[in-house]
Amino acid sequence: METIMKTKNVKCFFAAIAATTLVVGMVAGCGNTVKADEVSKEESSGSKEIGPDLTVGFAQSGNPNPWMVALTESMQQSADEYGVNYIYTDANDDMATHVANIEDMLAKDLDILVIAPMEDTGLEAVLDEAAEKGVPVILSARTTQGEYVTTVYSDQAWEGERCAELIGEKIPDAKVVELRGIEGTSSVAGREKGFRDVMAEQYPDMEIVVEQTANFSRQEAMDAMANILQAKGPDAIDAVYCHNDEMALGAVQAIKDAGLTPGEDIQVVGIDGQKEAWELVKSGEMLGTVQCSPKHGPTVFEVIQKILDGETVQKETIVPDQVITKENVDESESLVF
C-alpha cells in the first residue's frame, strides 16, 4: 500500500537525485550491532535543501503494535514540518510486499529512502539497487544486511543490560522467564545479549528458566505466560523479562489471571516506554520499563540534512533513552507514547 503525502505548495516534479557515497552495511550474523567507523559523504555540486523539492520515501515494514504506529506518526509529522514530498508505504509485515514497495519507490524520482526493516536479511538486492541509483538509505528501528548510510535506533543491548539490572537489584538470584520478540531481528539479538552480559558479569546466580518467543505480541505473551505458569508453577518464577512493553502487558494480565499479584509475586520488566506500561510502573504492577523511543522523525531529518550538506554521518545514530521506574515515573511521563 502506498500513500503519497504532500504539504502545501509542493511542486509536481523534482530534480535529479543527489550523488552520495554509500558504504557497506554492518554485519548481521547474530544481529549484534557494530560500532562502525564514521562514514563520509561527498557533497554533490547540485545538492538540494530540505523542502518541497526533496522527495523522501519511508518504507514501513508494518504497524502491528503501538511502537511502530508511533514511529510512523513521528516520520509523518517531521515530513510535514519540513515540507518535503513524502511517499509512504506499509508492507503489513509481509517481506515480499516490503521488497516490492521499495522497488516501486526506487522507480520514482526519489532523493532519500528511509526503511524500517522487517528482518536482518532480505533487503540486500534492493539496497544494492538504491546504491546503484545513488539514493542514500537511512534505516530506522532495526539494522539489516546491505548498503546504507546509517541506522537510527536505540541501543538495544543497553536496553537489555538495564532490564537485567532492574531485576538483579531487586532479586539477585532471580529465576527469570524471557519473552522474546521476533527472531532474526537485531532488536531481539541486542536485548538478548545485553541481558545475558549483565547476568554473567553482575548476577551469576540469576537464571533464565524459560525462553519463549512471543513476537512482540501482547496476546501471544499472555498465552505463553499462562502456559508457563501452569507448567512450572508460580514458585519457580521470580521475574519476567519482556523484549517490549506489549509483551509485558500480556505477562501482567496472565499473572493476574492466575490469581497472583504482579509486582509482588512476580516482577515484570519491559522495553519501550509505552503509556500503558508507564501506568503499571506507577501502580507498582511492573518493576520498570526501559525507554526505546519511536520518535525517530526529527533525528532522521537531521541526518538527511547532514547528507545533503556533505557532512560526516556515523554508521549508527543512537536515539538516547532512559530507564523508567517508580522512583522517576512522574518525571518521565513526557517520554512515553
Image: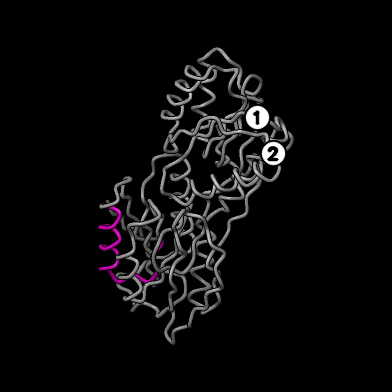
Q: CA distance from mark 2 to mark 1?
A: 9 Å
Residue 118 shows which numbered tag?
none
Q: Which residue is mark 1?
A: 174
Tag 2 secondary structure: loop
**Residue 49: x percent and y percent?**
47, 75
Q: Which residues are magenta?
A: 97-114
**Residue 152: x percent and y percent?**
51, 59
Mark 1 closeness class: few <14, some 14–19, many ≥20 residues within 10 Å:
many
Q: Quadrant of residue 75?
A: bottom left
Q: Quadrant of residue 262?
A: top right
Visual colour scheme: one colour
Task: Residue at 36% x, 67% y: name it.
Answer: 10
User: From what the image shows, is residue 153 above or below residue 20?
Assistant: above
Q: Is residue 64 left or right of residue 78?
A: left
Tag 2–tag 1 contact (CB < 8 Å): yes
Residue 203 shows which numbered tag?
2
**Residue 36: x percent and y percent?**
54, 68
Say if the magenta span includes residue 110: yes
User: From what the image shows, is residue 66 above or below residue 49?
Assistant: above
Tag 1 secondary structure: loop
Q: Is residue 90 left or right of residue 319?
A: left
Mark 2 closeness class: few <14, some 14–19, many ≥20 residues within 10 Å:
many
Callout 2 amino acid: Tyr
Image quadrant in which the C terminus is located: top right
Callout 1 amino acid: Ala
Q: Quadrant of residue 217?
A: top left
Q: Nearer the viewer, residue 104 or 317?
A: 317
User: From what the image shows, is residue 197 above or below residue 254?
Assistant: below
The numbered mark, 2 or 1, whose residue comes first in the sequence reads 1
Task: Residue at 42% x, 84% y: name it.
Answer: 46
Say if the magenta span includes residue 146: no
